[in-house]
């Protein structure tokens, strides 16, 4: 980065500070991870200069012969990775991928049934402050207060009562796997489309460690970072492409359009203009990495680490929503510790440990305060930490949470954090 250092020292200094933070802090935000150097090189390539509206072979600009090949490579790798029939790798983010699904399948005012944000869902699954809640009639299902888990019988009852146009699955803070087979049965019973947003768990699903949504859902969306460990971006997949059942036909021939055609149009021109071909190239790199045997080993370790950390927290007297985890994250209810999520996040930050405050089901605090924290294993597992390390991290976090106002405790823990990070180095090359 010597050119940037010379041309824009102010910006370079800020990037150096962020690089230092990543190098010497414990990154435990469940939605974050560390990409490979190869991914970052692709994202910083000359492809950033190329406009390429449309799809490979059907562009609105000339000079796309090489980006066509790159995008085809990304699509082919993604299809192989997930066993998908069709893929669109153009969405700029998970949110835009989700927006394309709404635009392709639903009309404004039609009804969606999704997981409540306060129970672990996501903004784009019908939150009233998001386009999905503003443009569509969003209804919600949630977890049981006694178990922290979904009750499929109650979801079936809600679907029969509401008769939604689409049912969404997926979450930002749900620690258990999903029963896609039963979800599809429910969707078929009420004539609804079934959509899974696997943004958080895509890497675990690709590795075959969680249930696979593609055989059961009409459409699946994801981000390409998080557990998938690629660049920040989105993607849409269809497990078995076929004629749509919504009555959409080609205007001239009257031919029934396939699901993939509706979704392609939902992306472009529906929600985006030109795709980011440098990011698509970086996605292709990460898909190739995920197709290697060591990727499954990594994902297995992510789950082992999340479970080990969760078990240690429970030994220390913390309440975990659902009593544990099947995936990469744990959701800790701090109410019995007399600490809010905001207090915990801020005190841990002073100790160089990064988590995020998070609402827990049936929370009485506001989203800006919360009663819980969400803690994830993917990023530090990428650095090489194992179960014993994550148990130790739980102990360090407990020291801070038990003394949230103590600067001495934060300083002491920060020194131990730096020691851990020195044993598992990350991005020294960035400042070279």
Image (cartoon, rainbow, N blue to C red):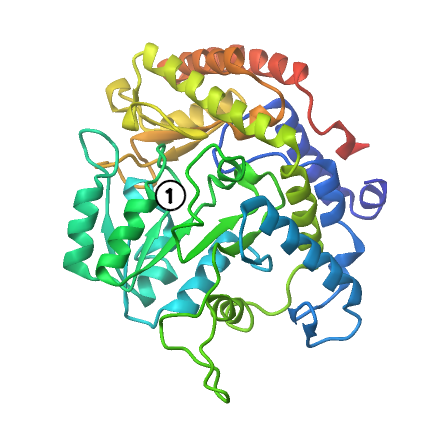
The residue furthest bottom is 252
Query: What x and y, as percent, mark residue 386?
Result: 55, 16
Q: Nearer the viewer, residue 143 or 408?
A: 143
Query: What x and y, as percent, mark residue 1?
Result: 81, 40
Question: In the rendered image, which quarter is residue 362 located in?
Answer: top left
Query: What x and y, as percent, mark residue 339?
Result: 30, 23
Question: In the rendered image, which quarter is residue 373 located in?
Answer: top left
232 sits left or right of 161 in the view: right
How many numbered marks have been drawn onto this rendered protein structure? 1
Quadrant of the drawing holding the C terminus: top right
Evaluate whether residue 46 shows in this view. Answer: yes
- Asked if 157 appears above or below 311 in the picture, the reply is below
79 sits left or right of 159 in the view: right
396 sits left or right of 189 in the view: right
- Asked if 173 appears above or below 80 in the picture, the reply is above
How many neighbours does mark 1 have within 10 angstroms: few (below 14), some (14-19), or many (20 or more)?
many
Query: What x and y, as percent, mark residue 120?
Result: 33, 40
- Asked if 362 appears above or below 401 in the picture, the reply is below
- Asked if 282 appears above or below 273 in the picture, the reply is above
Q: Secondary structure at mark 1?
A: loop
Residue displayed at 64% across by 44% down: 287
Evaluate whether residue 116 shows in this view. Answer: no
Residue on which disc 1 sits: 171
Residue displayed at 53% across by 52% down: 84
Question: In the rendered image, which quarter is residue 321 located in?
Answer: top left
Q: Nearer the viewer, residue 72 or 34?
A: 72
């Amino acid at each position: 980065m010597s050119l940037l250092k010379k041309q824009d020292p102010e910006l370079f200094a800020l990037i150096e500070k962020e690089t230092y933070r990543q190098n010497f802090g414990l990154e435990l935000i469940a939605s974050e991870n560390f990409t490979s150097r190869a991914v970052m090189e692709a994202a910083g390539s000359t492809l950033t200069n190329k406009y390429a509206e449309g799809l490979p072979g059907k562009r609105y600009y000339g000079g796309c012969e090489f980006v066509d090949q790159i995008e085809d490579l990304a699509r082919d790798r993604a299809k192989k990775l997930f066993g998908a029939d069709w893929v669109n790798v153009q969405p700029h983010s998970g949110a835009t991928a989700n927006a394309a699904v709404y635009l392709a399948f639903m009309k404004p005012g039609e009804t969606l049934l999704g997981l409540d944000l306060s129970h672990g869902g996501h903004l784009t699954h019908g939150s009233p402050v998001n386009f999905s809640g503003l443009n569509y009639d969003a209804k919600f299902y949630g977890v049981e207060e006694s178990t922290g888990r979904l009750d499929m019988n109650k979801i079936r009852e809600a679907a029969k009562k509401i008769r939604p146009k689409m049912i969404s699955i997926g979450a930002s803070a749900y620690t258990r796997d999903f029963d896609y087979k039963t979800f599809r049965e429910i969707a078929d019973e009420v004539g609804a489309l079934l959509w899974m947003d696997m943004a958080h768990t895509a890497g675990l699903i690709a590795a075959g460690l969680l249930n696979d949504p593609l055989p059961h859902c009409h459409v699946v969306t994801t981000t390409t970072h998080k557990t998938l460990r690629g660049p920040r971006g989105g993607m849409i997949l269809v497990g078995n492409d076929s004629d749509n059942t919504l009555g959409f036909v080609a205007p001239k021939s009257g031919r029934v359009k396939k699901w993939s055609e509706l979704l392609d149009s939902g992306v472009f021109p529906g929600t985006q203009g030109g795709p980011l071909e440098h990011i698509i190239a970086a996605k292709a790199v990460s898909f190739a990495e995920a197709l290697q045997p060591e990727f499954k080993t990594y994902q297995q370790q992510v789950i082992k680490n999340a479970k080990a950390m969760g078990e240690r927290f429970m030994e220390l007297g913390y309440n975990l929503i659902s009593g544990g985890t099947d995936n990469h994250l744990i959701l800790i209810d701090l109410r019995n510790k007399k600490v809010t999520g905001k207090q915990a996040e801020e005190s841990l930050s002073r100790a160089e440990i990064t988590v995020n405050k998070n609402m827990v089901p049936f929370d009485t605090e506001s989203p800006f305060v919360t009663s819980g924290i969400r803690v994830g294993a993917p990023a530090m597992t990428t650095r090489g930490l194992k179960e014993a390390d994550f148990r130790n991290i739980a102990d360090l976090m407990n020291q801070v949470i038990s003394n949230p106002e103590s600067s001495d405790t934060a300083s002491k823990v920060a020194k131990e954090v730096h020691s851990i990070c020195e044993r598992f180095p990350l991005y020294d090359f960035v400042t070279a």
